[in-house]
Amino acid sequence: LRVTLTAGPVRVERDGRAAAALDQLLERAVDRAGHRQVVLFIDEVTVLARNLERQERGSGDSFLHTLRRFRQEHGAAVATVLSGSIGFHHVSPDAPSTVNDIRKITVGPIRADHAAYLAECLLFGGGLSAETAHHLAPAVAEAGENVPYYIQHLVAASLAMYRGGRRILSPAEVPDLVTAAIEDPTDPWDLRHYRDRLAHYYGDDAPVIAKLLDIYAHAPAPLDVDEVLAQVRSTGIPIGERDELVSFIERLELDHYLVRTGDRDRFASALVQRAWRAIRR
């Protein structure tokens, strides 16, 4: 690492010695572990690799290849957990091949019964009676699509109404909290993030991707490629060939905007689909 002192805050920069330093650090960890297994956790590894790649072409791939070589050299002596909020395909075309020796696990919504239990615990912890929390929790979990992030927001909104001296919501009214969050101009759930991150994910292709998502957002049912292609051509979206469209769709599947069933795709989340329509107006 190179530390650069400027007039502002200290800035830490990567230089050519970083890869060697990483090698030395990993080797030292294995040596010191003796007969014990080393477990290497790296969170947001894809963001790190992408940032390295943007700073210096090839450096992100080099970082990922270093980790791969480390795993292969030490075998069972090393266990690796790599997590990230974006896919490896955002680093470079070659990046996914650097982790083809690691089992991939998609972290999606939790089980419905676990989601209801989470909601119940949060509601009870927030001051509702055990009976009321148990009664309301399944509706909160369902409205939040069993996603803890949405469940926490729904619980917070429910408790805010309760603490504000208003009545306790009925299960049938919980979906109204989702509508209120989507329509709130302050965007309390940060749903505009799904739109705003396109520029970071897709670069110059972001406007085309957004228009493609518009098609899916307004579709009453899942669409196959040819149905989407017909709309692309009728609306003048600048996608040249069918293969290019398929490539865009596959990238949207990898980024969990779309989900495929058979030969058709739809929005992976009905909540995000509603939010997308509202955001795009």
Image: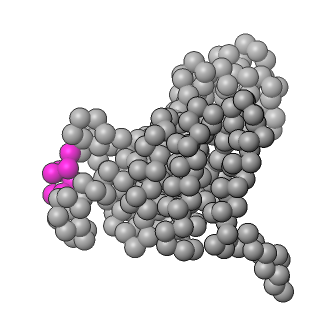
| For residue 261, side relative to residue 155 (left or right) | left
Q: Give 103 or 213, whichever is nearer the viewer.
A: 103
- Image quadrant for the N terminus? bottom right
Please report the residue visible at 59 percent of the width from the left and 39 percent of the height from the top: 74
Report x, y in % for residue 35.
72, 29
Front position in the image: 174 or 7:
7
The residue shown at (72%, 53%) is 25
Residue under the image location 80 percent in, 29 percent down: 126
Q: Quadrant of residue 23?
A: bottom right
In reply to whether residue 2 is colored magenta, the answer given is: no
The magenta segment? 224-230
Q: Is residue 182 visible?
A: no
Figure check: 67 above or below 132: below
Quarter occupied by the C terminus:
bottom left
Residue 236, x across and y down, in percent: 21, 70
For the stretch drawn in magenta, what is the main secondary structure? Answer: helix
Against 276, residue 237 (above or below) is: below
Residue 79: x and y in percent read 61, 35
Is 228 magenta? The answer is yes
* Residue nearer the viewer, 55 or 30: 30
Residue 45 seen in render: yes
Left-right relation of 197 to 42: left
Picture residue at 65% right of the left edge, 16% below the top: 135
Asked if residue 228 is positioned above or below residue 145 in the image, the reply reads: below
* Residue 37 percent coordinates (x, y): 68, 31
Q: From this view, report whether residue 20 is shown above or below residue 3.
A: above
Q: Quadrant of residue 177?
A: top right
**Front residue of this view, candidates 46 and 67:** 67
Residue 12: quadrant of the picture: bottom right
